Image (cartoon, grey):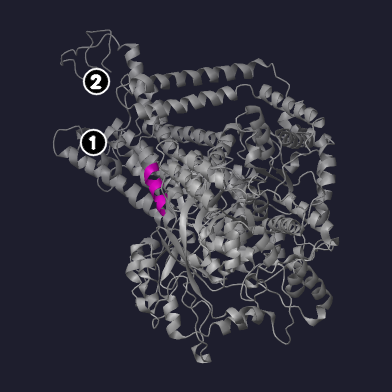
Amino acid sequence: ASFNKNTTESWPYLPDTFDVPVWNTSTPNYFQMSLTYLTLLNNFVPLSLYVTVEIITVFMMLLISWDKNMYHKDTDTNAIARSTIVTDLGQVQYVFSDKTGTLTQNVMKFKRCSVDGLIFGAPVEKSAPGQNSEINDDMDVSSNAFHPLQRLKIGSVPASRGNEDVEIGLKQHISSCISSSVNVGDPKTMTFNGEMFLRVMSICNTVVVEKEIDASTLGGKKKKKSSTTPLGKFFNRSRNNTATSSGSRRSRANTNDSSRGRLDSLDENQSQTTSVAESASMDMSTLNDVGTPIRSRNDTLESNIETRAGKSSDGSPKGFAYQAESPDEGALVSAASLEYGFQLIGRESDGVIVKCETPSLLADKSISKGLKSGSLTVRDVAFKTASPHVYQKDNETMSDSADDSSENFCTREKWSLLAVNKFDSDRKRMSVLVRSPTELGSIPILFCKGADSSMLDPELNPEARESNQRAEWYASTQLEMQSHLGTFATEGLRTLVLGMRILSEDECESWLADHKAASTAITGRDEKLKTVANKIEKNLHIVGATAIEDKLQDGVPEAIHNIGKAGIKLWVLTGDKRETAIEIGYSTKVLLPEMHLCEVADAKVDHVKALVATEFMKLVKMGKLLEYQRSSLKVSNRCLPTFFSSVGAFFAQSWRGFRKFYHTYIKTLCGTCNTKSSRKSLDLINDEIKLEEFRKHPKIRRQKVRNLAEQILKTHSSSDTTDKVPGVFERANSAKRSISEKRSSAIIDRSLTLAAVTSHNVSNAEAGKSLEEDNLSLFSFVPDSDLNNAKSEFDNRRRTVLEKVFAVDRDVRKGRLVKHLEKSKRVQLKNRLDEPQSAQDSGVGDVQRALVIEGAALAYFLGDELLEEMLFSVAKCCNSVIACRVSPKQKALLVKLVYNYVSPSPVTLAIGDGANDVGMIQEAQVGVGISGLEGQQAVNASDFAIAQFRFLEDLLLIHGRWNFMRMSKVVLFSFYKNACMATILILFSRKTLYSGTVVFDQFLVSTYNFILGWPIIFLGFFDRDLDKDYIKKNPVLYESGPNNEHLSARMVLRWVCLCFLQAATIYFIALSAFEDGGSVTSAFNGLMKYRNKDRPGEGEIGDLTIFGTTLFSCLVFIMGYKVLFESRAILIGRFPALYCPRNSVDGFWSRLGYSWVGIVWLSFIPYFCWLFLHESIGKAGASLLSPFVMVANHLLFTSSKVWMIMFFIPIFGTLFDVIGKVFSNMYFPTQTQIHCEIEHVAKHNSQRGATAEEIVAEFEL
């Protein structure tokens, strides 16, 4: 008040004897005052938000690690949060998952195999609908039968007297096709294909035999312990043996203890690793030479031991363990040892040592010399040995005939390792070139194994051109094996095809020279090695196929089902075959029996595009893709939306231009530093530009996509796509048809005899409910007017203004409730609800859909924007998507595909366990790694790490939902509290002519964020709206996160309105109480105890500091009330917290009432303590705190009016919040609020023991 144009005027309230003051005749510059006033608005920015969010985020990460429900006891692994994006877990819309090791255990078990046209091993229960149907009688009996795994070791088959006709026919067939030079029919030998099959399993690998970690397993007197290696833990399984072979195993186990000790030992010179050599301390004089048969005597029954004596749980020698590069290799090597006695016992730099319990056909010199010289071919020997030898055997089991003669046989063989062709993703196979031991002919042999699509390639496995019985037999076995591969795939088993080739000495030496040159090449070594491998991996003789089971992890189907109910779309990206992926999809509930399944297999490019285009147009006509219908593709010429979009694009472009300039010149100092980080930022900006350009004209782009789809269909209608490349199922069906046609032929092979003796029919299972494809197709191409005009179902006149403006729930706001339907539609809906559930599910319009696409077919779409959008439009209408045979790069591209074609861009999550999943994990916004058997690459590249896939349900539905809800309230409250204070400053500015005068003490303002930080921090720590069990029972509650329920524009608008109302309440009510002299007079006698009558002005509270402190106190109280009112779970605790009963599990930290601790003990009480501390410091001497002297004393001890103001004003301000919430919850509730009330009523009724009928009646009321 020092402005006065009359410079001679004296002081207005002092005697004239005082000198005339020096008046200011000019006001400050307007621009200067404006800038001073604008500085007051800096309080709108909550500087404490960053610290608050970081503290809460760290605690959320700890809660994830402390969650016992996500702790895996078997591996002693807890969940780990490696990133601070914990709130993104509550907004996930797409989940991309690997299969092997993620959905499955990555613990492979050898279950079945196909050799000589026979299936060995019991079938696995199928999950796909209709796969367990009755067996077709027209099919060959060998395709409908299986044999125990041990039957593979049988080389001759006895015929009972009841099969005399079969016996005569077999004898005639044998006499006509077996030469006298080959000794077949010996019960102790296997078939050639069977023996080579097992040798490929035991030799064609890179498995290493290492010393067992647990040394106690070496001691025979010590208690047997399980293997501590990963393979030792998981390969401990029970074999599929029958009662007929159990007796032979027991008889074969009668070995001498001393001989058994010699067999269980390892030669120091036959060890590859140092650990094996050091641990295998033994008497060399007790060992037989490599290749010499070892025979043991029959002892008494007391000395009987089990078959697996001398072997660890994974089939390795006792005290050792197999270490394999992949679980598949480990499963094959373990099965060869445990099931068939072909045990890998050591690996040297120049060879592989194998212990065999079955005599070898190659020990026959006539066979080995014939194969080596070329006078005998592999198929000759395989054909002759596969034909059964029939003899009579009375009153004895067939298993005894096969096992008695070889029960004591055991030999050690050293196969020289000449070269290894490692597996690669292009060849899809691996091979080893070995030389058999001298006693087995010293024959160069190539053992090879790989995927069926690679091994059955005509270039590798050419068909025999001669038309004799041998060729017909081989073709028949190949057809049988392809049929079996289809059976294995439908059971969800992982299949491999095994083959071999015998080389001449010249071929071997020539190829080894080429391999040596390629392996020593300095440039292009990988390509040269691949070329050399392809050169030798030809003219293979297929000996059989394996089927390995990778069991699902516990709780995977339930977790996937709940994730789907939460509105999250799951895409499974795997490298398995399409048929295996489909079976796994049904077993994991990714696919459901009632789903319409669209399969896009690899075929000609025109056929694949036409298939997707057909599905695309079908969805358009069904009304699933309304944005691609012609009525929606009309370009609008409205000026206002175009103007706003242009303005938004201008500002976005300007902001990106500034960012590019900053990262190009300012941050890098014109390219002298920080170039790497700036380059990454510039790449992100360029990606934003491309994405915005792509989304610039959505209707024009959609019109192009539709036109392309129609053009593809027109072209396809006249094109020839009959030469579709067959898959496993197609080859299997073709093979079954061929087998059925050959049933009338006179060829009688071993499969018929063995099937007639030991066949077991596959048990029938209940077929799942399937969808009528014809009805679906007919429905899809008949446009339904109700579907195409979905908006006409609702009556816009039934929407109120408050619903449009005030409602937070999207369905309420857009008028999609039942009450918004037209009257006729409501009647139809009511009648439909009264119908039985079966009648409601009979329609096909709302059928769930799934898409299965192969990687080769996917390659036709990736890279073309229009084709990508067409494919994604089909995929987004599907509840589940399975991409099989995809590469790691394609996995990452699929994640990016979703990010580009969904607007606004969704939050994507990728989960995997191996190195091939790293690209997918890094491309997604949220990466989750599973710490399994594939190493830590996925975990190291991820944001979160869990031990099992089922823990993803808790991570998303519980932690993700709670975290997003809590952090939303924290962010809103942080801005709200600062906005309230800034609003009061603005309201006060009109009293000071907007000069920038502050009503609050500045040192008091500095404590504002600290005082009000603790209540909201504890809310962010512990608040929860619904219990964990209730959320799991109702996964649909997760949709509140992706729908942005807690941070929607209308929710923010509510907080903004409440901010202005409460700030105005505080300021104007307090101002009315202080102005007009009501606070200038001293307090009356008796009202306040501490008034000192001897002090002039004692009790007067009319100054600016006390007025501002009163406003500040009201603000602190009303903020505390707001935190309590926003808390859905007020933690009261147990009193006293310091006292803990002796038998109680609760500790001090569990008994605290955190809600009251945060508000009372850490907010209100520290605030009043700071008032007196502030005053005490000011009394110490002249300082910046001197204006606060006696303020706390006058405020709290001498004026009752201040106490009344601080009591009533916060209550009045909170009434606005109460009224608004009650009105919203009563008339416009969100889905979360509805479920909160349901849970509350359910808890209340359960406590009073109400029946279900009473609960339903109460809800109806």
What residue is shown at x 52% (from left), y 48% (from top)? 911
**Location of mark 1 (residue):** 1188
Q: Position of residue 152 (x, y in %)?
A: 64, 69
- Is 929 displayed left or right of 169 in the figure? left
* Among numbered discs 1 and 2, the one appearing first in the sequence: 2
Give the foreground label among 1 and 2: 1
- Is 376 displayed left or right of 6 in the figure? right
The main secondary structure of the magenta stretch is: helix
Mark 2: amino acid: Tyr
Mark 1: amino acid: Phe
- Is 859 displayed left or right of 478 in the figure? left
Q: Position of residue 890 (x, y in %)?
A: 57, 39
Q: Nearer the viewer, residue 517 or 923?
A: 517
Q: Nearer the viewer, residue 960 or 382?
A: 382
What residue is shown at x 80% (from left), y 28% (from top)? 714
**Location of mark 2 (residue):** 13
Q: CA distance from mark 1 to mark 2?
A: 25 Å
Answer whether residue 252 is magenta in the image.
no
At label 2, counting other C-alpha atoms closer than 10 Å, the crowd grade (few under 14, some 14-19, many 20 or more) is: few
Quarter of the image for residue 1063 reads top left
What residue is shown at x 42% (from left), y 22% (from top)? 659
Q: Position of residue 896 (x, y in %)?
A: 55, 35
Q: Which residues are magenta?
A: 53-62
Q: Nearer the viewer, residue 1230 or 487?
A: 487
* Residue 1019 visible in the displayed image: no
